[in-house]
Image: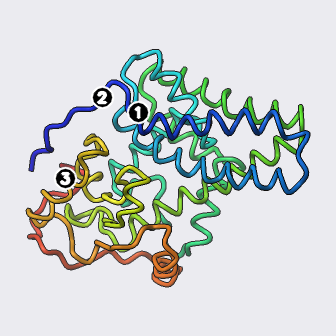
């Protein structure tokens, strides 16, 4: 199947509006921290987690289809979106597109390891880039093919880590609290990946990801629930994903048992994933509604 013909605006205003929330929250955090009691600080951090989580949807969209077209503005937005989630932008970009190349299967740097339960996966994915970054950074650096991208990668590490260290030395409680917020936010992001690939099979075109039909989730998170369509056609803009899901469903490219009315953050879905992901080695799906001759996601 060919991807649908799509266009994207020069300025994606809904995504930019969500990113503007971070631009309001972050200066407010810096300005008010010293005058707030612990309850006010806790409230700002809880609000910051919500802003971070929502901005991750924008960061994800921007990596695939830039939310701004002018090159200079695109460069700035890439840095600030990475900063809003605590990710060096170019490093996370490379890591994410490795995920799309292998679809959570062998070769995906972020796939769950045999014998690894949910909690261990989430903690390893969240903490390793901060405390044991050698493998992650090595993989990303080797995959960075151009000098410009390597300069961007170095810049992004300076932006994220430099800001954090500066805040720790300036106001230790503020810096450490922001770091804790990033860790909790990134753990939540890795949860989304785990839930979106629950019981999927990277070898089959109809089983690359879970499709959530939750109206509320898709309304607020830019159709992120249409994850199967996103993995088949990663460059389709978020507005077109419901139509792409419909086209794939008509063509038997969406497994019925990999569709749900729940969102990945619904407590019922969380409980199902926690029960279903044991520490036993991952067992890929063996049944399919399409033929065994379907090309793999890696090679096609």
Answer whether labels 1 and 2 touch (C-beta < 8 Å).
yes
What is the number of the mark on residue 9? 2
Q: Position of residue 25 (x, y in %)?
A: 68, 39
CA gap between label 3 and label 1 equals 22 Å
Asked whether, in this view, residue 270 is left or right of residue 133, the answer is left
Q: Where is residue 214 in the image (x, y as percent from the top left)?
A: 36, 67
Residue at point 25%, 63% (across, down): 203
Residue 278, relative to residue 93: is it above or below? below
Q: Is mark 1 on a helix, strand or loop?
A: helix
**Residue marked by disc 1:** 13
Q: Position of residue 190 (x, y in %)?
A: 53, 58
Mark 3 or mark 2, which is nearer the start of the sequence?
A: 2
Mark 1 or mark 3, which is nearer the start of the sequence?
A: 1
Residue at point 17%, 75% (across, down): 288
Asked whether, in this view, residue 264 is left or right of residue 120, the answer is left
Image quarter of residue 61 = top left
How many numbered dots are placed on residues in this image?
A: 3
**Residue marked by disc 3:** 244
CA gap between label 2 and label 3 equals 19 Å
């Amino acid at each position: 199947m060919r991807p649908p013909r799509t266009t994207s605006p020069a300025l994606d205003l809904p995504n930019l509006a969500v990113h503007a929330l971070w631009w309001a929250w972050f200066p407010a955090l810096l300005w008010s921290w010293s005058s707030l009691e612990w309850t006010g600080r806790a409230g700002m951090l809880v609000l910051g987690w919500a802003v971070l989580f929502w901005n991750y949807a924008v960061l994800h969209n921007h990596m695939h289809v830039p939310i701004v077209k002018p090159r200079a503005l695109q460069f700035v937005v890439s840095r600030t979106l990475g900063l809003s989630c605590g990710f060096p932008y170019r490093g996370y970009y490379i890591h994410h597109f490795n995920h799309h190349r292998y679809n959570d299967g062998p070769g995906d740097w972020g796939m769950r390891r045999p014998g690894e339960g949910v909690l261990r996966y989430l903690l390893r994915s969240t903490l390793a880039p901060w405390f044991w970054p050698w493998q992650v950074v090595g993989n990303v650096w080797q995959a960075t093919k151009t000098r410009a991208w390597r300069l961007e990668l170095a810049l992004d590490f300076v932006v994220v880590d430099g800001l954090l260290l500066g805040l720790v030395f300036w106001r230790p409680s503020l810096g450490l609290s922001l770091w804790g917020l990033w860790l909790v936010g990134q753990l939540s992001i890795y949860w989304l990946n785990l839930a979106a690939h629950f019981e999927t099979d990277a070898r089959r075109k109809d089983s690359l990801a879970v499709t959530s039909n939750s109206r509320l989730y898709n309304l607020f998170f830019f159709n992120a629930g249409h994850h199967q369509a996103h993995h088949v056609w990663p460059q389709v803009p978020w507005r077109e994903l419901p139509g792409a899901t419909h086209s794939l469903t008509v063509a038997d490219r969406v497994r019925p048992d990999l569709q749900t009315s729940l969102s990945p953050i619904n407590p019922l879905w969380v409980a199902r994933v926690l029960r279903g992901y044991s520490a036993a080695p991952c067992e890929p799906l063996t049944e399919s509604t399409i033929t065994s001759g379907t090309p793999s996601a890696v090679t096609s």
